[in-house]
Amino acid sequence: GFKCGIVGLPNVGKSTLFNALTQTASAQAANYPFCTIEPNVGDVAVPEPRLLKLAAIAGSKEILPAKMNFVDIAGLVEGASKGEGLGNKFLATIRETDAIAYVLRCFDDDDITHVSGKVDPLADLETVETELMLADLESLEKRKAGLEKKAKSGDKEAKALIPLIDLALAELTEGRPARFAKVAKDDEKAWRGLQLLTTKPVLFIANVGEDDAATGNAYSEVVTKRAAEEGAEAVVISARIEAELAMLANEEREEYLEELGLHEAGLDRLIHTGYKLLDLVTYFTVGPKEARAWTIHEGWTAPQAAGVIHGDFEKGFIRAETIAFDDFVAHNGEAGAKEAGKMRAEGKEYIVHDGDVMHFRFNV
Ligand code: GDP
């Protein structure tokens, strides 16, 4: 599954948001095994109205949404890269994520201490990112020394990596995250292989007070502007409101959202933005037993997509039978779509599209 780390200074609303996310998940799908593996790790159901429609048409007994994994990464303070606070442990946790969501405090409240004494979301972002940049700097400098030795004794792979390390170091020493480096297409794989903290895709969560949930405020505007300048994503959310929404049943939730002037719960916006950020798409498997949504990267082939269900599906892949979501609905299910000639047989090269309903044929 895909894993998103929730990162930010203390007292910005990370836990409030994380708890709202995971509570909503367990409340909305009572018979789905949402496990909170640790207090700070949770799977969240990806809101997907198309899945409900498919299940209704096929009369599926069970509905299994796709999941996104969130980790509440506490303990980031100035000096973390040098082992302050929870230091290294939390850097290791960030390393395992696919994306980082920075929670930035965009609410005034004299009762809630701000670690630096002043609400300033961009300054907070800088404090947090600086720790990640310092951690990257240190690890690159260590690796570079080793690689240079190897390169001298004729190791070609080591030699090829050095320019990439220099590229990352050039950004970092200028005080910019390594994701701003311009990497040649051919080098992208090796670049990802460096596994830096500051090359991960980022999302800014502007946590505004209850009264600003629908409109945002001056703080969140600054955050949104920064995201636009960087080509990053930003979501304006009130963690406190989300926590309240999480306690409500579906109908009440709709009413409350309307009252607040919100079209969609912040958590739904957050997850959808995460999909966009990571270039994720959804395909479905639908039958009388269950209807299920699966998450893959845009551009994945049918065997790769099958591999998400089970490794054997990828290894033994023969072909896929595919119906586009719209065709499945327009012809009232698989039998109708098949009759109308809308079920396609696709081979190993087929690129799975968002919304495809798939049947995989494979050898065991
Ligand atoms: P964390 O340390 O980043 O995990 O922050 P918490 O989620 O524990 O929140 C710290 C405090 O800020 C708690 O008392 C929250 O209730 C409060 N808080 C979180 N979001 C908001 C908000 O939008 N408005 C206000 N006034 N307080 C908030």
Image: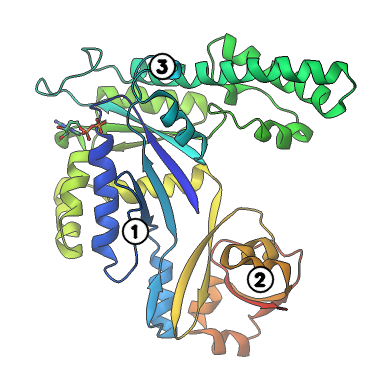
Q: Specify the amino acid type for callout 2.
A: Phe
- Mark pair 1, 3: CA separation: 33 Å
Residue 216 falls left or right of residue 349:
left
Q: Who's the residue at 44% across and 61% down the image? A: 66
Instruction: Work out which residue is located at the far right of the displayed protein and give it.
Output: 154
Residue 35: which numbered mark, if any? 1
Q: Secondary structure at mark 2?
A: helix
Residue 313: which numbered mark, if any? 2
Give the mark toward the camera: 3 or 2. 2
Q: Specify the amino acid type for callout 3.
A: Glu
Q: Who's the residue at 61% across and 62% down the image? A: 353
Indicate the position of residue 141 as horizontal and vertical percent values: 64, 15
Q: Who's the residue at 25% across and 28% down the image? A: 12
Instruction: Work out which residue is located at the far top of the displayed protein and give it.
Output: 174
Q: Which residue is mark 3?
A: 126
Q: Is residue 230 visible?
A: yes
Q: Is mark 1 within 8 Å of ligand 1?
A: no
- Of labels 2 and 1, earlier in sequence is 1
